[in-house]
Amino acid sequence: MPNVVNLKAIQSEKATYRFTYESDFFEHKDNSLVSGGKLDVLLDVVENKAENVFNVHLSIDGYVVTQCDRCLAELKCPVHTQPDVQVKFGDENDDDEDIVIVNEREGMLEVDNLVYDYAVLSIPIHPIHPEGECDEAMMQRLNQFLVDQE
Ligand SMILES: [Zn+2]
């Protein structure tokens, strides 16, 4: 079951939700960049009735598992990010990058893709182990034909 927040059911000015994501969540994603991880997510929703939007604050903490660019072994990348997102009801085909559009009839904010996208954004462009922590056996295999390197 995907994690959702029923925006229409929120009664108070501010509502807070907690979600956890384990490795199975990442294993089922169609993206070879992330092979596992564990994330704790706190999500606050504050409704701004005057402007007809929901201000959503996410706090995502944990790690994702990706591949080291140098030795190709698994690498844990820490994730600590606090993105703010605006959510409003509307036609889901509206294409606005800064605002998440939620179908008004259903009123369900899908949390999974938001969390996944922000977690992936936390991965460095060239993820590598700290110096000396690469998989030695793997490095030797990769470098066995290397004769010179500046
Ligand atoms: Zn490495």
Image: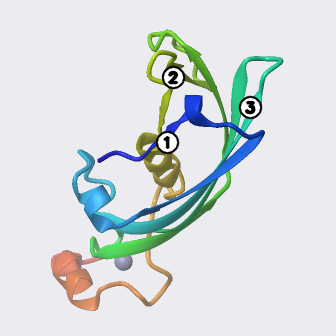
Real-space Cα separation, disc 2 to disc 1, in angstroms: 13 Å
* Element type where label 3 sits in the image: strand
Question: Does residue 86 show up?
Answer: yes
Residue shown at 51% from the left, 22% from the top:
102
Residue that extends furthest to the right in the rendered view of this protein: 50
Q: Nearer the viewer, residue 143 or 17?
A: 17
Q: Position of residue 48 (x, y in %)?
A: 78, 27
Residue shown at 79% from the left, 17% from the top:
51
Q: On the picture, is 90 further left or further right than 54? A: left
User: Between tags 2 and 1, which lies in front?
Assistant: 2
* Residue designated by label 2: 102
User: Between tags 2 and 3, which lies in front?
Assistant: 3
* Element type where label 1 sits in the image: helix
Q: On the picture, is 17 further left or further right than 34? A: right
Q: Mark 2 and 1 residues: CB-CB less than 8 Å, in contact?
A: no
Q: Amino acid at mark 3?
A: Glu
Q: On the picture, is 27 further left or further right than 67? A: left
Q: Which mark is residue 47?
A: 3
